[in-house]
Image: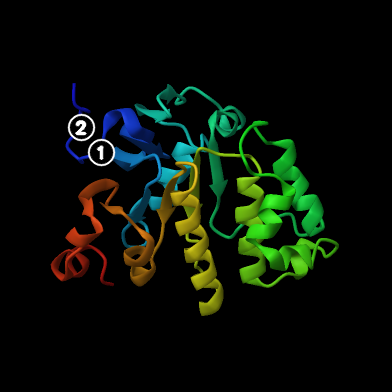
Amino acid sequence: MGDSKDGSGVQCEALGLRLAGVVVSYDGSRILRGVDIEVARGELVCLMGRNGVGKTTTLRALMGLVPCEEGTIEVGGLRVVEFGPAERARSGLGYVPQGRDIFPALTVLENLRVGCVASRGEGKWNLEAVLELFPVLREMLGRKGGVLSGGQQQQLAIARALLTNPSVLVLDEPTEGIQPNIIDLIGETLLKLKGAGGMSILLVEQYLDFCTWIGDRFYILERGSVVSKGAMSDLTESVVRTYLTV
């Protein structure tokens, strides 16, 4: 029997992440209005849209940082919508939030050890592996996180998330405030990650060229709803002008 597919063309058996009908409200105002997103194993999907349309809220709902009123969330087929943030991390979600949220008073090594403590205890990612991926961190293990540049902090945040050995990596605006050469490095790193071990990657990003470079598919949010989706080749000038141009 052939693999079944949903309307997005993703093989249902190969899904690493699925959000279906997710509804979120703040103080009586509805922010997400039935958001559906799917990411296959080994795929990088970009969640796009103008400021204030619900992208970060989608990620926070995914991670259990804000409650879902309706809908379901599955990681590798496991329903996690009733789980708290710690349980979701143990189920395979690794999160790099906007602003990076490293611990500025801890050293680079101590920041990385936080990821080791939260590890699911399986997979390829250990301290030596992430230092090979981000060699600049090896030179700074004794430095406080707060003195690192923005690009170095972003590498630290991604490395820390990888040390949890996630099956799904979730990143919120990883290029924000980062110098161009580090943006290139992060892009190359994400391409390596999606191609190795079947990791699913969901990326919120405003930088259009970055998305078209590394993304396989996209979803666009407008007023808390998905208004466009498809392969990156479907991201036409008309779609960009309608939903992304400020």
In this view, the residue farthest toward the left is 238
Q: Which SS class for mark 1?
A: loop
Which residue is more in the foreground, 26 or 162? 162
Q: Is residue 2 toward the left or the right of residue 63 in the image?
A: left
Which quadrant is home to the C terminus? Answer: bottom left
- In percent of width and height, residue 54 lies at 36, 50
- Above or below, comparing residue 226 to residue 246 in the picture: above
Name above or below for residue 72 compared with residue 184. Answer: above
Number of disc labels: 2
Amino acid at the residue labelled 2 = Lys
Could you tell me which residue is drawn at 35 percent across and 58 percent down? 215
- Residue sitting at x 35%, y 54%: 46
Q: Nearer the viewer, residue 160 or 242?
A: 160
- Badge 1 vs badge 2, beta-carbon distance below 8 Å: yes
Circle 1 is placed at which residue position? 10
Q: Which residue is mark 2?
A: 5
Instruction: Estimate the spatial distance between the alpha carbons at disc 1 and disc 2, rounded to whole Å.
Output: 6 Å
Q: Which mark is residue 188?
A: none
Determine if residue 177 is in view.
no
Q: Quadrant of residue 238?
A: bottom left
Q: Is residue 109 visible?
A: yes
Q: Pointer 1: residues within 10 angstroms few (<14), some, or many (20+)? A: some
Q: Amino acid at mark 1?
A: Val
What residue lies at 43% left-to-right and 22% top-to-bottom? 79
Percent coordinates x, y for residue 230 in the rendering = 21, 51
Q: Point out the residue furthest to the bottom here.
A: 180
